Image (spheres, rainbow, N blue to C red):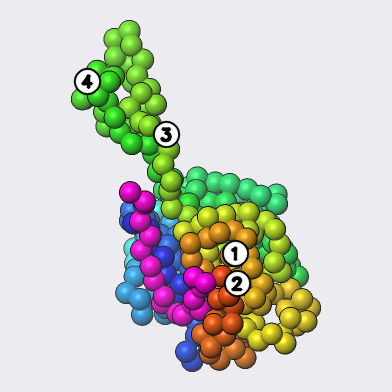
Amino acid sequence: MLDVCLLGTGGMMPLPYRWLTSLLVRYNGSSLLIDCGEGTQVALKEKGWSPKPVDVICFTHYHADHISGLPGLLLTMGNAERTEPVIMIGPKGLERVVGALRTIAPELPFPLRFIELSEPREQFQIGPYVIDAYKVNHNVTCYGYSISIPRKGRFDVEQQQIPQKYWNRLQKGETVQDGERTLTPDMVLGPARKGIRVTYCTDTRPVPVIAEYAKEADLFICEGMYGEKDKQKKAKEYKHMTFYEAAQLAKEAEVKEMWLTHFSPSLVRPADYVAGIQKIFPNVQAGTDGKTVELGFED
């Protein structure tokens, strides 16, 4: 199971009922965080999830509402006695930005490792996650992310006469020598099966690359800065998205479900505007702080 929690759904500034942007996913004891707005660690505490297992932190961009919660989170992770490295991924300049923020968190019991994005599309395999970063269209360099959990093919040794002592190693992807016979993983595994994928984007105009990476995603979490129809001009000016534009992307990508997030402070009740876009894409919900889902593999 992949646990997904939308920790914060606010844009620009925190509100008494809405923390700033942050998303956490968990799989097999490892956690991955996307963005870390102010209040992220409070939202984690309210959820009852620990920050200690956060192995990877991805940043879409370096506006304060997406990164200002980082120093406090790092200190809390240190106080939780984490010693393993934390990998950080973000646009070029990441190490410099984090270094500046760490002026108030200078000593940590774990190392930070930086991956700075420079290409329009980049892919990484870190722990259980396949991470696709893709450049979007904001007024500063900004990336969206697709987080995938791949799934190996079905295990089958009936026709291969392979000793049981090798099964586990072959399932893990090892090649094994059995006398003069070379045993390879493909001898015991069928074709790769459909995995799990969550696609996330915020602070951007709608661009084709978003629908491309969200194609048939199990969950698409997308910016909906404005729900009102008359905010289209403002969305274009500040390079954000409306609910209607997000719904169109979800329709094009044929995703299973979409959650809207990163709401303008002026958008007090986002759920009031969802009915207006369900004619475009029916399976859409307005995100709320702490909204959680468990995504499993298909049978």
> Magenta part of the protein: which range?
282-299
Q: Is residue 189 magenta?
A: no
Depth check, mark 4 against mark 1: the one in front is 1
**Label 3 vs label 2: CA separation?**
35 Å
Q: Which residue is mark 2?
A: 280
Q: Position of residue 29 (x, y in %)?
A: 33, 56
Sequence-first tag of 1 and 2: 1
Q: Report crowding for label 1: few under 14, some 14 to 19, many 20 or more residues within 10 A (C-alpha).
A: many
What's the residue type where badge 3 is placed?
Pro
Taking 112 as reference, is 143 left or right? Answer: right
**Label 4 vs label 1: CA separation?**
49 Å
Depth check, mark 4 against mark 3: the one in front is 3
What's the residue type where badge 2 is placed?
Ile
Taking 175 as reference, is 230 left or right? Answer: right
Q: Are marks 1 and 2 in contact (CB under 8 Å)?
A: yes
Depth check, mark 3 against mark 2: the one in front is 2
SS of the residue at dot 2?
Answer: loop
Depth check, mark 2 against mark 4: the one in front is 2
Q: Which residue is mark 4?
A: 163
What's the residue type where badge 4 is placed?
Pro
Q: Report crowding for label 2: few under 14, some 14 to 19, many 20 or more residues within 10 A (C-alpha).
A: some
Above or below residue 51? Residue 212 is: above
Residue 94, visible in the rendered structure: no
Q: Are marks 4 and 1 in contact (CB under 8 Å)?
A: no
Q: Position of residue 58 (x, y in %)?
A: 55, 60
Q: Position of residue 226 (x, y in %)?
A: 64, 82
SS of the residue at dot 1?
Answer: helix
Q: Which residue is mark 1?
A: 251
Residue reaching furthest to the front:
279
**Label 1 vs label 2: CA separation?**
7 Å
Mark sitting on residue 69: none
Above or below residue 204? Residue 178 is: above
